[in-house]
Amino acid sequence: MAVPHATEIRRHWYWRPGWGIGTRFYTWHITFDGQPEVTKLAEQYRAVLTGQPMLDIIPTQWLHLTMQGIGFVDQVDRDQVDAIVAAAQERCAVLAPMELTLGAPHVDPESIQIAVEPAEPVRQLRAAIRAAIADVWGPVRVPEPAEPYTPHMSLAYTNADGPAAPLVEALAAVPTLSATATIDSCQLIVLNRDEGMYMWETFATVPLGR
């Protein structure tokens, strides 16, 4: 089912609690390195969206599917992060690689998002990551609510407040596009937003299946 477009957008780049220049954050993502169809899909939409001044387009190397945060680097002991990674390796070993389809875009209040289907394998992966964190910290210390959670890949972030109509019209002018991606791992990354974009270094890669 198509996700409805927002009617208004708001600036995405305000400083959320705990964030600032130099902040680093441990979080789990699915990244899309080595996924040529995803790269092509993003490039096709990028050609249309680049002309929209209220958008900051996400470069190909920073395309991602957000899953689950752990915490700020200066607030989490490295040995606990290592233990979470080890627990995630055990739990993800029983999950099969995923065949995902990325399809219809929609305007969210703070981003342009692409739907990811089927959602259930991504939800199962996130549940495994959350369980790995609980293995180390206990269930009550798992950060972030389990719901709501809707798997998606963002194409761009909004940099202004205003009506969403120009973005909706731009997307409507693009023929229906889709891409497939085979996901056989997930990444624990060290995230920053020092340069007005989410960028990262990979801390650990955890394979799906053995």
Image: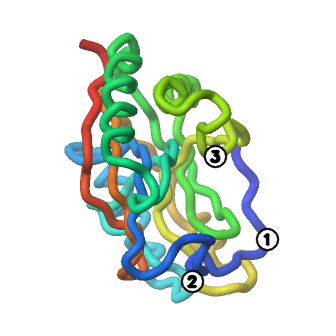
Q: Nearer the viewer, residue 141 or 70?
A: 141
Q: Amino acid at mark 1?
A: Thr
As drawn, the residue found furthest toward the right would be: 7
Q: Is residue 97 left or right of residue 177?
A: left
Q: CA distance from mark 2 to mark 3?
A: 25 Å
Measured as percent of width and height from the top left, residue 191 is found at 38, 61
Q: Is residue 79 above or below residue 184?
A: below
Asked if 208 appears above or below 157 in the picture, the reply is above
Of labels 2 and 3, the one closer to you: 3
Residue 183 occupies quadrant = top left
Mark seen at residue 159:
2
Q: Is residue 112 visible?
A: yes
- Where residue 47 sits in the image (x, y, percent)? 38, 72
Q: Quadrant of residue 161?
A: bottom right
Identify the residue at horizontal 38%, vertical 11% (top origin).
Answer: 94
- The residue that disc 1 covers is 7
Quadrant that contains the N terminus = top right
User: Quick one: 84 or 199, which is closer to the camera?
Assistant: 84
Q: CA distance from mark 2 to mark 1?
A: 16 Å
Give, as a three-letter code, the residue at label 3. Glu
- Mark before the other along the chain sequence, 3 or 1: 1
